[in-house]
Amino acid sequence: MTFDRSIRIAPSILSADFADFGREIRAIEAQGADWVHVDVMDGHFVPNLTFGPPAVKAFRKHVSTVMDVHLMIAPVDPYIDAYAEAGADILTAHLEAGPHIHRTLQAIRGAGMKAGVALNPGTPAESVAHLLDLADLVCVMTVNPGFGGQKFLDMTGKVRALRRMIGDRPIHIEIDGGVDPVTAPLVAAAGADVLVAGSAVFRGGSVDNPAPYGDNIRAIRAAAEGARAD
């Protein structure tokens, strides 16, 4: 993975057809997705259950771009090696998921992955000030984690604060929750460069009719890039 601050669209397969993940992943990549975002939920840290390491390993066979795995679980540390073996390129843990986030980020990097740290809406940007030299990505939640399709919460002030704190470090700012062509320009103008979108990408399409996926991805990208140009 090479680093730059160009806009990346990372569709969340939480909004895909659960009966046809392989074709869905190949379809979104063919339609312009930069990364594939995988939301892992444990029914404990967040009120939902999704994918364990065996499922993520199965997804890996179909991902030719970057597999961006977002752990909404607690604890994290016992599962880091399993997700590394499953093929995650980026593994993101929540700051709120445990008391030793430095150790977690070190372990993620030690397992050969890029390390991400996620912040819930109620967690301030300043909470990661002493973590930035251990992080490759900061994920700003713009919904309370646990379910897809929620309404966007405006965290642009937090994004701007993070962008100032990051400076010239090679760290992505990712936005997860409620991203669409209306909200993408807000966060892109504030300094975000990775946009996770679920229903806004998959809406109107299917594996047998994937063209709407491409239309949706292009609309989000154009809106975000246009905000940066203004």
Image (cartoon, rainbow, N blue to C red):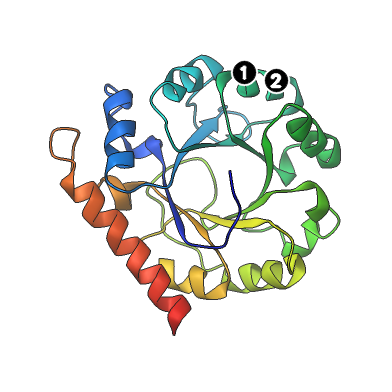
Looking at the image, the residue that sits furthest to the left is 209
In percent of width and height, residue 176 lies at 51, 52
* Residue assigned mark 1: 85
Q: Residue furthest bottom?
A: 230
Q: Is residue 222 visible?
A: yes
| Residue visible at 49% across and 23% down in the picture | 56
Q: Quadrant of residue 190?
A: bottom right
Q: Dot 2 surroundings within 10 Å: few (below 14), some, or many (20 or more)?
A: some
Tag 2: amino acid = Asp
Judge the density around disc 1: few (<14), some (14-19), many (≥20) Cα neighbours within 10 Å: some
Residue 204 seen in this snapshot: no
Residue under the image location 37 percent in, 46 percent down: 33
Secondary-structure class at tag 2: helix
**Residue situated furthest front in the rendering:** 2
228 is higher (above) or lower (below) than 28: below
Q: Which residue is mark 2?
A: 81
Q: Position of residue 141 (x, y in %)?
A: 57, 54
